[in-house]
Image (tube, rainbow, N blue to C red):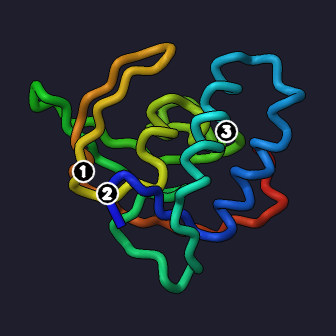
Amino acid sequence: MGKNVLIVEQKEYVLIKRAINLSTFIQDMTLKAILERYSVALETAKIISESDMPKNIIRINSKVTIEYPDGKLETFQLALPSELGINQNKLSIFTDKGALVFGRMEGISINSTSMQTSERFIIKEVRQRSNNIGLDMVL
């Protein structure tokens, strides 16, 4: 399995697939593009159970530190939109950067140009937080 293949826990896979299925009703073109990117990536993703999930894979609620080429570090927690708040250093899984890191492993380099941004960084550290995600979570 290559480093570019997403590794996704089963419940998180179902949650994102639900969002993709609702994308026909979404007016926000940026969000539609992100959901399309997820749709394509999930076609080749490795879907695994909670108990088999490696600790170095970025998931919902993971705390992530990335390093940019200039040495600047950024730390954030990947979250569902309903979990976001002011000054909490949380990043939605439905943002460009959130979609770039979700399902990726610690140590890989990301080089991407999207509709909104050009991103280049290395995933330096992944720390797991509680992942009690119910399938009825509000997106």
Relative side of 44 to 83, left or right: left
- Give the structural element (helix, strand or loop) at label 2: loop
Residue name at image x 65 percent, y 70 percent: 10
Residue name at image x 37 percent, y 72 percent: 55
What amino acid type should be assigned to the residue bearing mark 1?
Ile
Q: Nearer the viewer, mark 3 or mark 1?
A: 1
Q: Nearer the viewer, residue 122 or 1?
A: 1
Callout 1–callout 2 Cβ contact below 8 Å: yes
User: Percent position (x, y) of residue 111?
Assistant: 29, 32
Q: Nearer the viewer, mark 1 or mark 2?
A: 2
What amino acid type should be assigned to the residue bearing mark 2?
Lys
Residue beneath label 1, please?
A: 108
Residue name at image x 32 percent, y 60 percent: 2
Q: Residues within 10 Å of mark 2 (few under 14, many from 20)?
A: few
- Give the structural element (helix, strand or loop) at label 3: helix
What amino acid type should be assigned to the residue bearing mark 3?
Pro
Q: Nearer the viewer, mark 3 or mark 2?
A: 2
Residue beneath label 3, please?
A: 81
72 vs 137: above or below:
above
User: Percent position (x, y) of residue 102?
Assistant: 48, 49
Residue beneath label 2, please?
A: 3
Q: Of label 3 and label 1, which has the lower sequence position?
A: 3
Q: Nearer the viewer, residue 46 or 31?
A: 46
**Which quarter of the rendered picture does the N terminus lie within?**
bottom left
Q: Of label 3 and label 2, which has the lower sequence position?
A: 2
Q: Residues within 10 Å of mark 3 (few under 14, many from 20)?
A: some
